[in-house]
Amino acid sequence: MLNGPSVPVRMPHSRRRFTTYAACAVAAERVPYFADTAYVAGARRFDMGERDHFVSLEMAALGMELMARWGSAGVIARLRMLTDRLAAGLGDRGVTIAPPRVRAPHILSLSFPHGMPERLFERLAAENVYVASRLGRLRISPHVYNDEADVDRFIAVFRSVMR
């Protein structure tokens, strides 16, 4: 539901649009998803446009230690519970949701049988709800910093904008 790094830390630059060569060839709404998978020559292929930022490194280290203490099974169970709660609250809103046996524990993807509603992302963002578009689907990705109140708020906002 919030885009950010893969550790339970939100950083102010995490919503920045990447402009590196590697990211330019990827477009969420394009088929195929990766238009050009060729590497850039030399060491530039590893450049993601970032430079060492020691505050972020310390935060990342603390986040990784926290994740190691929780363990992957605990994180998976927690995220599966959140996505299952989302699915239960959204299933009657005219969206198609894959059955639990084929879903990833940390992502819920909503399909719209009649097409993506107009300005859906803008209306959600106006309520400070951020999701991603993936090939005509709505991707909801809770993380360990999200809780049941976040999920319930998402469901309420989604219901409101889908009226």
Image (cartoon, helix red, strand yellow):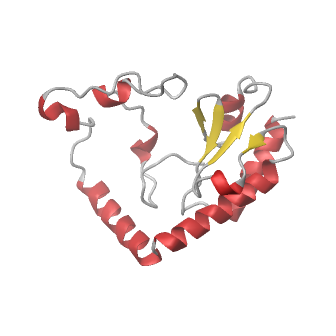
**Which residue sits at x=64%, y=52%?**
102
Direction left: furthest residue: 42
Q: Nearer the viewer, residue 47 or 15?
A: 47
Instruction: Name the quarter where the C terminus is drawn.
Output: top right
Q: Position of residue 37 (x, y in %)?
A: 33, 27
Residue 16 located left or right of residue 157: left
Horizontal and vertical percent for residue 121? 66, 31
Residue at the image position 74 percent from the left and 22 percent from the top = 118
Residue 157 screen position, x and y as percent: 77, 44
**Residue at left 20%, top 26%?**
40
State the image quarter where residue 7 is shown.
bottom left
Q: Is residue 46 above or below residue 56?
A: above
* Relative depth, front residue between 152 and 117: 117
**Which residue is the extreme one toward the front?**
101
Q: Is residue 115 left or right of residue 27?
A: right
Q: Quadrant of residue 80?
A: bottom right
| Label tally | 0
Residue 72 in the image: above or below residue 161: below
Evaluate whether residue 150 shows in this view.
no
Question: Picture coordinates of residue 16 (x, y %)?
Answer: 42, 36
Q: Residue furthest bottom?
A: 69
Q: Residue at x 69, y 56 (%)?
A: 100
- Residue 17 seen: yes
User: Is 83 above or below relative to 1?
Assistant: below
Relative to 107, 58 lies left or right: left
